[in-house]
Amino acid sequence: MMYLLYNIVLHLLLLALLPYFLLRLLTEKKRRYGLGEKFGVIKTEKLAGLAGGNVVWIHAVSVGETKAAIPLIKRLKAKQPGVKVLFSTITKTGQGVAEADGKGLIDALIYFPLDLPWIVGRVLRKVRPKAFILIEKEFWPNTMRLLRSASIPIVVVNGSISEKSAARYKSLGFFFKSVFSSVHTFCARTDEDRQRAVSSGVAEKNAVTLGNIKFDLNPAAPDQAKLKSLAEAGAISSDTKVIVAGSTHKGEEEILIESYKALGVKDVRLVIAPRHPERFDTVASILDKSGLNYVRRTSAPRPKSRRRIDVLLLDTIGELMSVYSICDVAIVCGSLVPGIGGHNLLEPAFFNKPVLFGPHLTTYLSMAELLEESEGGVRVESAKEMTEALTKLLSNDMLKTKTGLKAGRVVEENRGALEHSVSIIEELILKNRKSVSPRI
């Protein structure tokens, strides 16, 4: 009865909002990407790479989860060469990262289907996975119910449930208890995440705390030709101090600009990397009005240009990690304004760089606390505090180096969750080798 009511509401909402969605489809190109796949219409040739192996369906919402999933896929395939990976995301940027970073690892890449039983059922009948791996969060009731009815085990890797989400699941416990009871194994990032998973409906014996697999990322060595190109684009020399503001959102660029203007350090380049490509032009407009000299990565002047540059706008996808590797200090955004929750604070820490972040952290709060405790990261509450922290680090090379090394040590001391997660998935695949026929 609960699922019947849920599906009635979903279909009524779909009908009511249809004119709005049609308008968005007509006016926004990004809304049209993967539209057929979202309704379960997947071209046969797109799934051809899954033939002849044990299919594991791995779902990651967007960019951060996708990056975290790639090392897991690599390790799983190394241990189980017969595994075929179907990978799904919701966003276009997530698809782009999966296509680039998952080349040679992902056997089929699709957009995640809408959570309607007739759509999800169609996809399950096509791919017949041996296991479904959910990276971090987003629990879809119909998808999880159909997976359970088909005896397809669900594993949540790097599982995270915020306090706000846990309260919502508790208020609708009569429904979500059933949803979360479908989970075979919930691999929680923290003890708090594990406790919230159990209170939401995951059986206590099925919930374990493994840690965060993002500590197990091993970024590839930056391409030297790309680094040279980036340095030329931003007029960065060996004497230039570089601040990278990664994954910025609306409202954060103004804070960064205010802080940068107040810096008491000479020859400092600020690199701003917006989180979403559709904001590249918007951020350029903000910089136009800022009074700062800036250049876009995609339209940088010739290397011999003598024009003074304050800001490099990184209006490309896939270069942020390379820029982190050459920066002096990193500011991980999505944390300077409320409502986002932050982004992966470890990306610059992998390169032994000091990490700054704002006060509005939820998703990455435990990571922030580790960095603060180790003195490898600094939380700033305002543009003024950001300026003070940046000036302190950029004017003292010894302090900057020590802070960066402490950030790197946090990464090294917290590795291991990836291997445990892969072992759990591997065991399920070995147990579930027989053909699965969804009973839907």
Image (cartoon, rainbow, N blue to C red):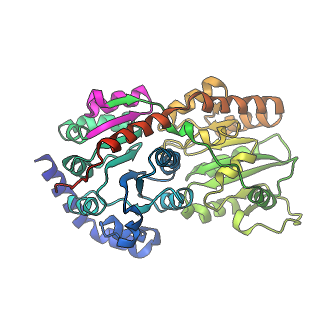
Asked whether 37 or 125 is in front, the reply is: 125
Relative to 197, does residue 20 appear above or below in the rendering? below
Relative to 369, does residue 252 appear above or below in the rendering? below
Relative to 23, does residue 190 appear above or below in the rendering? above
Residue 17 in view in this figure: yes
The residue at the point 34 percent across, 69 percent down is 42
**Residue 47 falls within the magenta-colored stretch:** no
Residue 18, given in percent of the width and then of the height, sits at 27, 69
Q: Is residue 211 left or right of residue 145?
A: right
Residue 119, given in percent of the width and then of the height, sits at 25, 63
Asked whether 255 or 13 is in front, the reply is: 13
In magenta, the rendered stretch is 183-206
Residue 106, given in percent of the width and then of the height, sits at 47, 57
Residue 43 in view in this figure: no
The residue at the point 76 percent across, 43 percent down is 262
Relative to 190, does residue 283 appear above or below in the rendering? below
Q: Is residue 438 left or right of residue 1?
A: right
